[in-house]
């Protein structure tokens, strides 16, 4: 918790000078579905879901009409799965949460529609369990990776927009695990 607080304070200190010359800030809340993918052929999934519900909140500022910066938090959900492998069966549970700091770019298509993208760094915390006849593990890992995202917004008013977006979290758990997240959101400008 101390590391999360320190990261938030440092990010706020970093973004504060940028916000002084900014053209406007926003808060974005979203809900969607994440998908965990693995680059590992040693295990075969027999049951479980790798598409949990995800929640996110972010705050950003526009430095000019196109570019900006954003800090956010995402709960990528919890998955419980069962696998078979050469030695028997394995039951796992994984929950990932991420903090990100990203540069953003926005292009207005009309007064109502805009598209946006982001690219940045993410700090992921994953808690996991693994149980089999010979194994009982309960552990957590912290990984730093990169984040890329794209989306579109429909502006109901100049200060309120509905968004749809996709974010990709690289190295979320280890070098073989990646998470993608689709979401619907509400963006409030100030």
Image (spheres, helix red, strand yellow):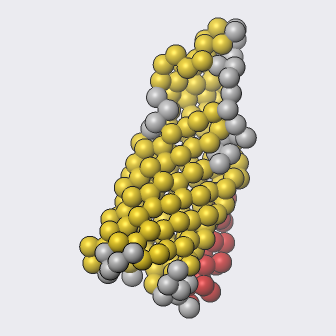
Q: Residue extending furthest left?
A: 156
Q: Name the spot of residue 133 as percent of width and height, x first.
A: 65, 9
Q: Position of residue 17 (x, y in %)?
A: 62, 86
Check the picture and name the quadrant holding the C terminus: bottom left
Q: Is residue 66 left or right of residue 121?
A: left
> Looking at this rendering, what residue extends furthest in the bottom direction?
21
Can residue 136 be seen in this snapshot?
Answer: no
Residue drawn 39% across the image and 75% down it: 109
Residue 25, x across and y down, in percent: 46, 80
Q: Which of 185 and 41 is in front in this view?
A: 41
The count of marks equals: 0
Q: In which quarter of the image is the N terminus?
A: bottom right
Identify the residue at image location x=44%, y=68%. 115
Residue 18, picture quadrant:
bottom right
Q: Decide which of 185, 80 is in the foreground and name it.
A: 185
Give the vertical position of 21 relative to 131 (above or below): below
Farthest-out residue, front = 109
**Residue visible at 64% across and 63% down in the picture:** 120
Q: In this view, does 115 lie to the left or right of 177?
A: left
Percent from the top left, x then y, of residue 42? Answer: 69, 20
The residue nearer to you, when weighing 96 against 9, is: 96
Residue at the image position 48 percent from the left and 54 percent from the top: 166
Asked whether the viewer can see residue 129, the reply is yes
């Amino acid at each position: 918790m101390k590391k999360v607080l320190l990261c938030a304070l440092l990010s706020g200190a970093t973004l504060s000078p940028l916000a002084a010359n900014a053209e406007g800030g926003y808060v974005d809340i979203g809900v969607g579905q994440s998908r965990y993918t693995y680059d590992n052929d040693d295990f075969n999934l027999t049951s479980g879901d790798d598409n949990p519900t995800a929640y996110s909140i972010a705050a950003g500022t526009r430095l000019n009409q196109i570019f900006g910066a954003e800090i956010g938090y995402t709960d990528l959900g919890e998955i419980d799965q069962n696998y078979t492998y050469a030695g028997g069966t394995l039951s796992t549970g994984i929950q990932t949460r991420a903090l990100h700091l990203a540069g953003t770019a926005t292009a207005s298509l009309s007064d109502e529609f805009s598209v946006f993208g982001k690219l940045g760094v993410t700090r992921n915390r994953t808690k996991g369990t693994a149980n089999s006849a010979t194994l009982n593990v309960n552990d957590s890992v912290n990984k730093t990776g990169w984040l890329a995202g794209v989306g579109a917004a429909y502006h109901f008013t100049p200060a309120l927009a509905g968004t749809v977006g996709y974010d990709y979290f690289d190295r979320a758990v280890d070098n073989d695990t990646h998470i993608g997240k689709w979401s619907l959101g509400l963006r409030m400008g100030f």
